[in-house]
Amino acid sequence: MNPFLIDSIGYIALVINLYSMSAKGEYKLRLISLIANTGYILYGVLISATPIIVGCTIAVLLHSYHIRRLRINKNSND
């Protein structure tokens, strides 16, 4: 695969991750971070970087858990 395209995927994930830090509200922050970490996983696979794949997979699982918890709490409060 084209090295420029691979680097572009990494930089796009970085920009999304930086954007998530400006998000207001935990739900939005976690959702955007989940998307960014999914991009990092793709990037890690393309460059064969196991630490990036493992770390971001853990982050995706944690964000997914907290998003689910937030949705359940929101539904129980309605």
Image (cartoon, rainbow, N blue to C red):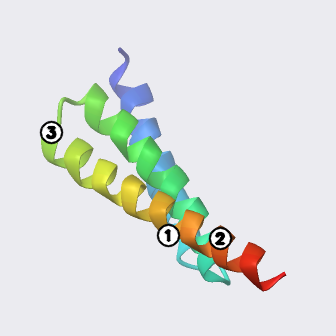
Q: Earlier in the sequence, mark 3 or mark 2?
A: 3
The residue at which mark 1 appears reads as 66
Task: Indicate the quadrant containing the N terminus: top left, top right, bottom left or bottom right.
Answer: top left
The residue at which mark 2 appears reads as 72
Do residues under tags 1 and 2 come within 8 Å of each other at their CB atoms?
no
User: Is 9 or 34 nearer to us in this picture?
Assistant: 34
What is the CA distance from the residue labelled 3 to the residue labelled 1? 24 Å
Do residues under tags 3 and 1 come within 8 Å of each other at their CB atoms?
no
Query: What residue is rendered at 45% in x and 44% in y?
Result: 38
Q: In the structure shown, which secondary structural element does the residue marked by tag 1 occupy?
A: helix
Query: What residue is rendered at 23% in x and 30% in y?
Result: 47
Pinpoint residue 43: horizontal percent, then vertical percent: 35, 37
The residue at which mark 3 appears reads as 50
Mark 1 surroundings within 10 Å by alpha-carbon count, few (fewer than 14), some (14 through 19), many (20 or more): some
Q: Residue furthest front?
A: 76
Relative to residue 34, is residue 26 depicted above or below?
A: below
- Viewer can see residue 63: yes
Pinpoint residue 33: horizontal percent, then vertical percent: 50, 62
The answer to whether 50 appears left or right of 29 in the picture is left
User: Is 54 or 2 nearer to us in this picture?
Assistant: 54
Q: Amino acid at mark 2?
A: Ile
Q: In the structure shown, which secondary structural element does the residue marked by tag 2 occupy?
A: helix
User: Is 61 or 12 nearer to us in this picture?
Assistant: 61
Relative to residue 61, is residue 45 depicted above or below?
A: above
User: Is 70 or 43 nearer to us in this picture?
Assistant: 70
